[in-house]
Structures are given as C-alpha cells and as structure tokens.
Amino acid sequence: MAQKREGLGGRGRDDGSSGRGHMAPSSGPVVPAPGGKGARSGRGKRLHRLARHRLRFLESLRQVGPLVRIRLGAAPVYVVTDPALVHQVQSSKGRSFGRGKQFQRMVPLLGHGVITSDGELYHRQRRTLQKAFTPAHVERHLVTIHRQAEKLCASWEEGRPVDVLHAMKGLSVAVTAETLFSGRLTERVLSQLSRVLPVVEKAAVERPMMPKVVDRLPLPFVRRGDEAMARMRAVVQEAVAACRGQTPRSAGDMVACLLAARDPDTGRPLSDDLVCDEVIAMLIGGVANVPATLAWAWFHLALRPGAEERMLTEIGDPGGGPLTTAELERLPYTRAVMYETTRLHSVQLVTQRTTAAVELGGVMLPCGTDTAYSRHSLHAFVPFGGGRFKCIGDNFACAEMMATPAAAGGGGFTSRPACGWECR
C-alpha cells in the first residue's frame, strides 16, 4: 500500500501546514506524526499530548520513523528519533545547524547569554567562559562544593524529613554563585536568588514549548515568570556592578573573567547587559539539571538499598576534606550511578534549526528547517549534548554530582523512600 511522503511529488502538507516561510524536504522518508492529517484538531491533539504526556508522546515517535514531522506552532518541526542521525546533527554535520526555536524563545527571559546565543557571538562567549572551567579551576571548585555540602548536611536534624530537590537547588545556587563571584555575594543576595531562580528555571523550560502569543497574555504563570526574571536581573546587575573595581578573591572568579574580557575585533569590554546575560545563563545552567539529577539519584537509591550501600562503601569517609578530581576518578560506581540517572532523566526536547541546506537520513532539509530530538527517548547517553553546543560546564557538573554525595555520605546520611534524607 502506497504511503504519502513529503518530497515525492509536491509538498504533501497533510498535517495542515501552510508552508509560510518554509520549504518541504526535497526527498526521502519523512513521515508525519499520527493524527495530524490536514486539521487543526490534529495539531491540537499533539500539543495536548506533548504538554500532558510529553515523554510518552516523544517515545511513541520512535515507532513512526527516524525523521518524523510534527507541528508545534506556525511551522513543522522534524523530530530526529535515530541516535546515528542525532550524532550527525551534533557532530559531523553540526556546522549546518544552529540554535532552534526553543532557545530563541528563551531570549526574552534569559537574554543573549551562552545558553541562547548563536553564531560568532556564541563562539566569542564560549572562549571567554571556558577559561573558568579548566581542570585546575574545577579542582578549586571541589573545595567549594564540599564545604557547601557539609554546611547543608549539618543543618539537617535527626528524624526530620528533608525535601531533597529543594535542598539540592539551594546547594547548587550557593555553589554556582560562589563559582561566579568567588564568595563576594551577601547572604541577602543569595537568599533572593534562591527564591527567584526556581521560578525563572520553570519558565525557561515551559514557555519555549508554548506559542509566542502566550508571552503577551495576562496569565498568572506568565506574570510570575516575568516578575521573577525582572527581580533576578536587578539582583544580578547590582552584584556585577559591585564587583567592578574589586580584586577577585579567586582565580576562578567567572565574573572577573567577564569584566576583563575584550572584544577581539574592537578591543572593547563586554557591555554590562551582556555580562549580566552571561551570569544569568550560568546561574540557570548551574541549578537546572544537577539538583534534579541528584534528587532522582537518591530516589532510585532509596528503592535499591544494595546499590546505595555499595555507593556509600565506595565513597567511604572523606574525613580528610574534599575529594580531588583524581580521587573522583577512583569512584567508578558512584560515577555510574550519576551517569545512569542523567541518562534516565535528561532534557526532554532539544531543538535546532538548519543554517544551510543539509541532507539528513536521505532527506534534504532546506535552510531554516526546525529539527528536534529527545535525549530521553533516544536511550543514548548524550546528557550534555554534543558538538559545538555541548554544555560548557559538563566537567564541573559531573564533579558536583559526584562530590555532593561524597560529602553527604561521609557525614553518615542515607536516603529513605518516605522522607528523603535523614540521619542514621
């Protein structure tokens, strides 16, 4: 039985696409997602399924084909479900792909930091920030991670339930802020950041999945996100302004690196707005994934006492102080636990847009085509992305994920399914 496919004689817009500003692939097996034939109702069903049953919907696309067309707005999105094709998007053909609409929709919230920027601006920003993530700097950050984790554990009381995710978010805020400002932030500023960051993070994840018109609607969650972002930007601007003219307390002070950076073409320093954008990007990056990974890891360990005991035995009692990067390398089971948790609970959808015509899986995608892939549904280990957009702080994130349970484990804490962490 013949199946209608795009590019085999006509544009084949059986999903209701108007095609405005977009040309269909010229050839190859692009298959539309089920339920979308020429009707707004089909598109609405997909948006509903993506919003309410996101993981189930994304996993179902693997059964449809390696390249599946869906609609999430005014133009179709081509979801890549084959790991080999995702590798091409990230690496071998990565120069033909730029940031997708997901990241462009974050700009009104987060600005033009390294998370959202593209092109030459992104490469300049990455070169500047990379100086703060060298192995030597990660080694120094381990001291901060250990100290903050021990401080957090010391505040827990025997028999008192702990909200692990909330606790890990607070820990990551403290660690990331000290990494950025080398301890120059007051407790008042840290407290303000701890309050607004989860709201901003939630908005940065959810808003890009919604139509752009939502940003202008007087909805409560839109207002909360905008107010939290405005407050966060004001706090960051105040903190950055206070750092100007001060001597950094650490060679790993990222804000000092940003303030000292010069444009390679003009020799001018970065604008205050761009410095703030970078700080906000690093704060969001620091609290978005690591706390959730740690919370999920302890959830899974709580259900598997043997695995938890094995990890704690491997960690031992780091009574001599913070672990070094060399010592972390000698914790293979702890690393495996964190890696597997990251694989199971990674970012659900990543979008990219073609910057030139490119062939993918036998399909010629024109310039400006929106593509996406789900790290979760791939069941492949790509938690930090790949290619030129790979997470700039991947080594730091791995170190934090391993050093945190090492500090907590040494304090004699264990997870329990009903109440998070409590003292033995």
Image (cartoon, rainbow, N blue to C red):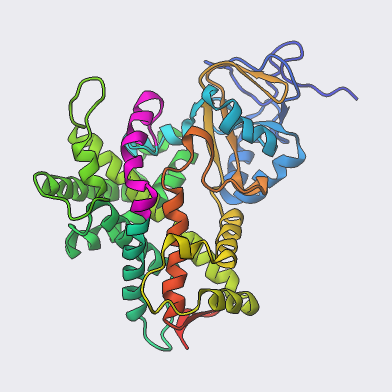
Q: Is residue 263 visible?
A: yes
User: Which corner quadrant of the image does residue 60 belong to?
Assistant: top right
Horizontal and vertical percent position of residue 115 = 39, 39
Residue 400 horizontal side relative to residue 258, left or right: right
Q: Quadrant of the N terminus?
A: top right
225 over 185 or under it: above or below: above
* Direction left: furthest residue: 245
- Front one among 26 and 42: 26
Say which of 346 and 8 sits in front: 346
Residue at 47%, 65% (x, y): give it.
327
Query: Residue farthest to the top?
Result: 9
Check residue 269 for magenta coloring: no
Tell me where residue 16 appears, x and y as whole percent.
Answer: 64, 24
Which residue extends farthest right? 1
The answer to whether residue 282 is left or right of residue 52 is left
Q: How many marks?
A: 0
371 relative position to 68: left or right: left
Q: Position of residue 250 (x, y in %)?
A: 22, 54
Residue 163 visible: no
Residue 358 higher or lower than 106, as above or below: above
Segment tinted magenta in the rendering: 116-138
As drawn, 262 above or below 323: above
Q: Is residue 120 magenta?
A: yes
Image coordinates of residue 312 in percent, x first then y, are 54, 77
Magenta stretch secondary structure, dominant? helix
Residue at the location (77% across, 41% down)? 63
